[in-house]
Image: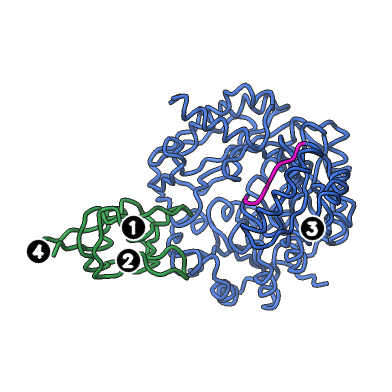
Chain colours: A green, B blue
Amino acid sequence: MAESTVITPLPGVFYRKATPESANFVEVGTQVSAYTVIGLIEVMKQFSELTAGTAGRLSAFLVEDGDPVEPGQVVATLNDE
Amino acid sequence: MMTQAINKLLIANRGEIAVRIIHAAKALGIPTVAACSEADMDSQAARLADEVHLLGPARADKSYLNVEALLGALKATGANAVHPGYGFLSENADFAEAVIAAGAIFVGPSPETIRRMGDKAEARRTAQAAGVPVVPGSPGELFDVASALKAAESVGFPLLIKASAGGGGRGIRLAENARQLSEEFPRSQREAQTAFGNGAVYLERFISKARHIEVQVLGDGQHAVHLFERECSLQRRRQKIFEEAPSPVLSPLQRETLCASAVRLTESLGYTGAGTLEYLYDDITGEFFFIEMNTRIQVEHTVSEMITGIDLVQAMLRIAGGEPLGLQQSDIRLNGAAVQMRLNAEDPARDFFPSPGLVEQLLWPNGEGTRVDTHLYQGYRVPPYYDSLLAKVIVHGADRTEALSRARTAVEHTTLTGMASTLALQGELLQQPWLHSADFHTGTLETWLAERRSGGAA
């Protein structure tokens, strides 16, 4: 079972949902494609989507909703079953 | 009225404006406390203030927008006044109220004034009551073509038919004359009914080539004065990029009429502190219309300071400390011209994508009439959590030509490496003939940016 990681290229704040009232983009255990949005990175008041980058099953989030992130930081892990 | 001197000032803000407020307080002999988030503990403001108080985590909602944390900071530091700067809680009436309830001074107008001018409809009514022109519109909702045609007589063409329940630019149709209004009105009603479940529409004058012109005012609760106007038409997504004072297009009579209207409105509010009244100016008819009031200091206050020699932030602190204005309108002279260029941590080549980073090389211009308001220093890491403003390069000249020429030199003499910024874009902007001839309106900058992109001008 191969593992891969989702890395943020940007610094900022990581969000798992589009608005405080929305549902999470994805839950742990969900099958995602490379283009699936797993969260948002807010940098200087602008929001960018963070996509999974590779297909797989989302196995864990290493960053909580609303936490600061640094470029290169691992946000989530995927495995390919 | 409370007349209490400021003995220690808490700065509820960050970045360049926090530094600016520290300078003003220092000049008045007032000790300062920089209220900082975790991300700002090594900021310029934290270094310059007499004391630093940690508010909370980096995120603004946990620090600079956290009323409880700010009230805690007042208590912990013994400060008896708060300067809110701009943005964050600067126009939050509840915050101003909480500061006053805690026995401290809010450097700004009363919570009632903040609330009143923060409500668009109420601000419009207040302006009308003070005899200040607002964008002409129908007095209320319209239900048939005949009444729309009647209302159009006073609104004037071209006009917009707007859905009452619309917003964000949706539910709007343009009519250039009575014939078009007759045709478009029923369509607008049907569209509004379908889109918003409410067929109510109203009319508003359409100003195709509007300039954004704003008047700086100061009031002490009894009297108010103006510091002339600023022209802020050059905007991208409603964010000002390049500002100047005075407006290059107003005649002395227009200036006098515009500024007098701002003072009238300010005095009708019993306004205390610094404020700005924003207007749309119709280049074609020469009319101006009040749109809103900002009840705080603004980013571009600097150009008004440069042409009048008045320190607005010091004036705010003096007034908040109970001093009278001490200025008559006749004391305030318009001297020369000034421009301000905003340097933002944004990459114009990547559609202005944010670019926080580490300041590597830094060199500021220091020619005659040149001023730089910034919080940057060499080795400073610009955090990604807040807005992208890095610095304001401000230049004064005997006239607009000299100011623009000095602005070009100032841009050439600035070095900032370590992140993308709008520095080079400002240099390019200063080469545009339409900038020199002041032939622009609020849409010009975006049109230029779009042409620049597609024209491949690297």
Q: Secondary structure beneath disc 1?
A: strand
Cβ atoms at labels 3 and 2 below 8 Å apart: no
- As for residue B453 lying within the magenta part, the answer is no
The segment highlighted magenta reads B170-176
Cβ atoms at labels 1 and 3 below 8 Å apart: no
Q: Is disc 3 surrounded by few (<14), some (14 to 19) or many (20+) residues within 10 Å?
A: some
C-alpha distance separating marks 1 and 4: 23 Å
State whether discs 2 and 4 lie on one chain: yes
Q: Which comes before the other along the chain, label 1 or label 4?
A: 4
State whether discs 1 and 4 lie on one chain: yes
The amino acid type, in three-letter code, at marker 4 is Met
Residue pointed to by mark 1: A37
Residue pointed to by mark 3: B141
Cβ atoms at labels 2 and 1 below 8 Å apart: yes
Residue B253: x and y in percent read: 88, 34
Instruction: Please state, as top left, top right, bottom left or bottom right, where the C terminus of chain B lies in the image.
Output: top left
Chain holding disc 1: A
Q: Which comes before the other along the chain, label 2 or label 4?
A: 4
Chain holding disc 2: A
Residue B419: x and y in percent read: 40, 41
C-alpha distance separating marks 3 and 2: 45 Å
Residue pointed to by mark 4: A1
* Residue under the image location 30 percent in, 69 percent down: A27
- Residue B223 at least partly seen: yes
Residue pointed to by mark 2: A26
Q: Residue B49: which quarter of the image? A: bottom right
Is B30 placed left or right of A25 in the picture? right
Residue B341: x and y in percent read: 58, 37
